[in-house]
Amino acid sequence: MIEVEVKAKINDFDSVKKMLNEINAEKTHVEHQEDSYFNSPIKDFGITDEALRIRKVRISETSKIFITYKGPKIDSQSKTREEIEVGIEDASKLTKIFQHLGFKKVATVIKNRTIYNLNQYIISLDEVEGLGPYMEIETDLEDGSEFSDELNKIFDIFKKLHITDGFERTSYLELLEQDKSNKRSL
């Protein structure tokens, strides 16, 4: 599957929520996500632009766990990339398996995400610990599909929401790492 995704830093959620309502986006739920990222003993995912994570999701009293592989970004203006995700039962056991195979846990990203649907697009308002408010719009395509039309439609949705700058191709993990690095250099 190809995940076509664009992310933007936003000032606040309130004005965006009002505009989402105006364009008839439907709020579906709020979830808490805790993402543990791992690096490979064979290659450095920071260099290859790949990601491997275990995501714990809590929606009200329900919890789910996923393992996700993300391939390198495939264009210069978005976070579009191959994504493979599978549900798992036990994050701690999978973490032990990874560690026995030489994978190193490099960081954890924690966020609260409010999710809206607009046709086939998922719109996420993310409050990321240490980063503040972000918004993502994404859709999924079959492998090998042309994604440029979907990418243009995503940017059109951002325009309808009066978001024309602040776009970010860097992952939350990379943004947090940059912030840590900047604080160390002060």
Image (spheres, rainbow, N blue to C red):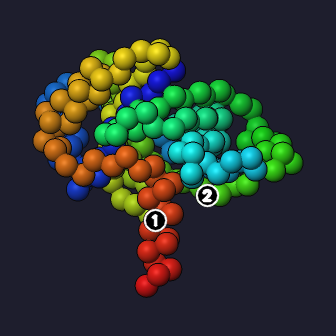
Q: Quadrant of residue 85?
A: top right
Vertical placement of residue 51 versus 152, above or below = below
Q: Is the residue marked by circle 2 packed among few (<14), some (14-19), or many (20+) residues within 10 Å?
A: some
For the point 13% across and 41% down, the residue is: 162
- Tell me the kind of residue under disc 1: Gln
Residue 95 screen position, x and y as percent = 77, 46
Look at mark 2 in the image and give the residue it sits on. 107
Q: Is residue 85 visible?
A: yes
Q: From the viewer's perspective, is 126 left or right of 70?
A: left
Figure disc tally: 2
Q: From the viewer's perspective, is 145 left or right of 43?
A: left
Q: Is residue 63 visible?
A: no
Q: Quadrant of residue 163?
A: top left
State the SS at label 1: helix
For the point 37% across and 35% down, the residue is: 75
Disc 1 versus disc 2: nearer the observer = 1
Q: Are marks 1 and 2 in contact (CB under 8 Å)?
A: no
Q: Of marks 1 and 2, which one's residue comes earlier in the chain?
A: 2
Q: From the viewer's perspective, is 116 left or right of 182?
A: left
- Tell me the kind of residue under disc 2: Ala
Residue 111 screen position, x and y as percent = 47, 51
Vertical placement of residue 115 versus 8, above or below = above
Residue 185 screen position, x and y as percent = 47, 81
Q: Quadrant of the C terminus?
A: bottom left
Look at mark 1 in the image and give the residue it sits on. 178
State the SS at label 2: strand
Vertical placement of residue 108 versus 5, above or below = below
- Residue most toward the right? 100
Q: Is the residue marked by circle 1 packed among few (<14), some (14-19), or many (20+) residues within 10 Å?
A: few
For the point 13% across and 33% down, the residue is: 160
For the point 53% across and 45% down, the residue is: 49
Q: Quadrant of residue 78?
A: top left
